[in-house]
Image (cartoon, grey):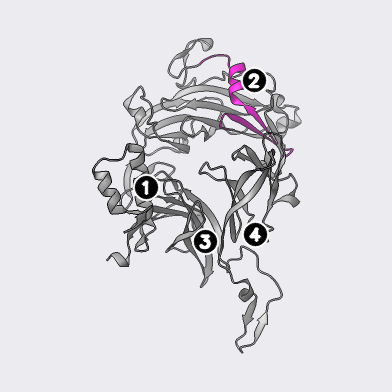
């Protein structure tokens, strides 16, 4: 029986049955009980289901999507079950992108359908649909535009506001030779969810944001603009709305400035109602490699790489307040590998930083210097290391028994060496799931290592049955009692493997 802070599971279940805990405390205790069960030596993860597809497979929050979101399976039962299958669509109606929306629990909404999870889907012919995430029933549809080709969906603020981004306008060589200059790069349409409401549509114009603009994203209320000069500039989207919105548009209502046409219906769509006629104030600007900058931490810091190829793999951590480089703010694992290491702010909102290399994972935290709050120090909280016998790997024994030492050194991510391939955080169980891969007998073998999120201690290793081919792309999701592995296979096919927690031999 697993122990939880001095009490075992049976004791907690007894207290729960007598209604001693409130809802919040009860939920936390339930997850502690589940964590204890998952980590028991007598419990194993067993592969229960495999399904292949000729198109990309997606997973999110207990749902597995096949055939461009047309077919949805639930991974919650002991074996995945079909939830729904949408009616067949023509190529013109193909779903290009989708977002899963979880309903809010803290407020009432106008319609019962708003209180349930839904799937937002963008189609090739510029329709935005909202489907029930449980039944696949169509709940709402919005026509975006007859002129601009929208292709991408993304969250601005997760589960609150999202944006739809168009493809970029390209000037043909003949038009360029004729002296025609296309200043419009793309369009963004921004919406609120639960209920679905329009915020506005804006044009990203090179004459406003600069001729070197190459891409734009919206995140946490910030418009991030990337330039071909390896510069990223951030703008306040709230300030843009307050200053440049011309007309408040409501889905399903008439637009009087456009002759009374209905907003969001075909063939009219949604007109541009946010007209930016001058460059807004720049909140933040940084020159960085591959236009990559991350902002997070407590207090606010940002991570970037200097805009020169020689600095690739060397990350700088600076204060967002005054751009000061933190003490030990240059993190460089000096890897000799085919794939670069990567770094990001920990998704558990602790403000920590995770730096992942082929054989080492460093979890870092930002500390204030004792003598001055203006200087911050990057301190290693703990490390997770792969098991490697580097001395033995440099020695070969010939068929005659002669020992030969290698004259060359292996790459840090050589297939013969245990290598970290990805890290997943399970927020409800507070565990880090680390995928390690080793090449054995001409095929890659993977294990999922479960580590304590606060100490890095290794608590469990889960072997994956299928081989892991490092030449193809992989995704792994750890969700409570379920592990989902999605891999690309030969001939550009895809395969989904599902593992569920089951009784081990000790429980038989």
From the viewer's perspective, is 310 left or right of 192?
right
- Residue nearer the viewer, 434 or 371: 371
- Residue under numbered circle 1: 31
- Residue under numbered circle 4: 338
Q: CA distance from mark 1 to mark 4?
A: 39 Å
Q: CA distance from mark 3 to mark 1?
A: 26 Å
Image quarter where the N terminus lies is bottom left
Q: Which is more N-terminal, label 4 or label 2?
A: 2
- Residue nearer the viewer, 226 or 166: 226
Q: CA distance from mark 4 to mark 3?
A: 16 Å
The secondary element bearing badge 3 is classed as strand
- Residue under numbered circle 3: 436
- Identify the residue shown where x is 34% and y is 48%: 76
Mark 3 or 1: the one toward you: 1
Q: Which residues are magenta?
A: 219-248
- Identify the residue shown where x is 49% and y is 57%: 489
The secondary element bearing badge 4 is classed as loop
Q: Which is more N-terminal, label 1 or label 2?
A: 1
In the image, residue 472 sits, relative to residue 237, either above or below, namely: below
Q: Are marks 2 and 1 in contact (CB under 8 Å)?
A: no
Q: Residues within 10 Å of mark 1 (few under 14, many from 20)?
A: some
Q: CA distance from mark 2 to mark 4?
A: 44 Å
Q: Are marks 2 and 3 in contact (CB under 8 Å)?
A: no
Outermost residue on the left side: it is 18
- Residue under numbered circle 2: 276
- Identify the residue shown where x is 52% and y is 15%: 248
Q: Which is more N-terminal, label 1 or label 3?
A: 1
From the viewer's perspective, is 26 left or right of 302?
left
In the image, residue 91 sits, relative to residue 461, either above or below, namely: above
């Amino acid at each position: 029986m697993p122990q939880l802070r001095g009490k075992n599971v049976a004791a907690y279940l007894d207290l729960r049955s007598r209604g001693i805990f409130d809802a919040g405390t009860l939920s936390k205790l339930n997850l502690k009980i589940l964590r204890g069960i998952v980590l028991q030596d007598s419990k194993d993860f067993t592969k229960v289901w495999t399904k292949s597809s000729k198109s990309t497979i997606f997973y999110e929050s207990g749902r597995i999507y096949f055939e461009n979101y047309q077919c949805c399976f639930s991974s919650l039962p002991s074996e995945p079950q079909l939830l729904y299958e949408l009616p067949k669509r023509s190529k013109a109606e193909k779903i290009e992108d989708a977002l899963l929306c979880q309903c809010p629990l803290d407020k009432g909404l106008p319609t019962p359908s708003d209180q349930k999870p839904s799937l937002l889907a963008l189609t090739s012919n510029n329709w935005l649909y909202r489907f029930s995430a449980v039944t696949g029933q169509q709940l709402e549809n919005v026509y975006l535009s007859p002129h601009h080709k929208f292709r991408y969906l993304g969250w601005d603020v997760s589960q609150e506001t999202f944006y739809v981004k168009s493809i970029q306008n390209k000037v043909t060589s003949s038009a360029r030779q004729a002296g025609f200059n296309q200043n419009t790069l793309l369009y963004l349409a921004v919406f609120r969810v639960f209920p679905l409401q329009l915020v506005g549509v804006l044009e990203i114009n090179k004459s406003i944001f600069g001729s070197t603009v190459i891409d734009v994203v919206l995140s946490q209320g910030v418009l991030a603009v990337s330039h071909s000069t390896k510069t990223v500039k951030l703008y306040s989207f709230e300030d843009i709305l307050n200053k440049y919105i011309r007309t408040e548009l409501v889905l399903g209502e008439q637009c009087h400035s456009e002759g009374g046409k209905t907003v969001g219906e075909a063939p009219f769509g949604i007109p541009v109602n946010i007209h930016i006629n001058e460059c807004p104030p720049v909140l933040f600007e940084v020159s960085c490699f591959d236009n990559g900058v991350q902002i997070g931490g407590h207090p606010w810091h940002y991570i970037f790489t200097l805009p020169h190829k020689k600095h690739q793999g060397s990350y700088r951590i600076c204060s967002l307040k005054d751009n000061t480089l933190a003490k030990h703010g240059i993190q460089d694992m000096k890897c000799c590998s085919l794939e670069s290491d990567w770094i990001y702010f920990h998704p558990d909102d602790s403000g920590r930083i995770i730096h992942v290399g082929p054989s080492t994972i460093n979890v870092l935290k930002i500390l204030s210097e004792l003598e001055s709050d203006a200087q911050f120090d990057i301190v290693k909280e703990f490390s997770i290391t792969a098991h490697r016998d580097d001395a033995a790997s440099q020695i070969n024994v010939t068929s005659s028994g002669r020992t030969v030492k290698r004259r060359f050194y292996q790459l840090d991510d050589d297939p013969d060496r245990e290598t970290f391939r990805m890290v997943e955080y399970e927020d409800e169980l507070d565990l880090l799931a680390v995928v390690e891969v080793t090449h054995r007998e001409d095929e890659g073998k993977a294990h999922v290592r479960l580590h304590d999120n606060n100490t890095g201690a290794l608590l469990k290793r889960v072997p994956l049955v299928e081989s892991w081919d490092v030449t193809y792309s992989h995704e792994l999701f750890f969700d409570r009692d379920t592990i989902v592995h999605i891999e690309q296979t030969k001939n550009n096919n895809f395969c989904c493997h599902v593992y569920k927690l089951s009784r081990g031999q000790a429980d038989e």
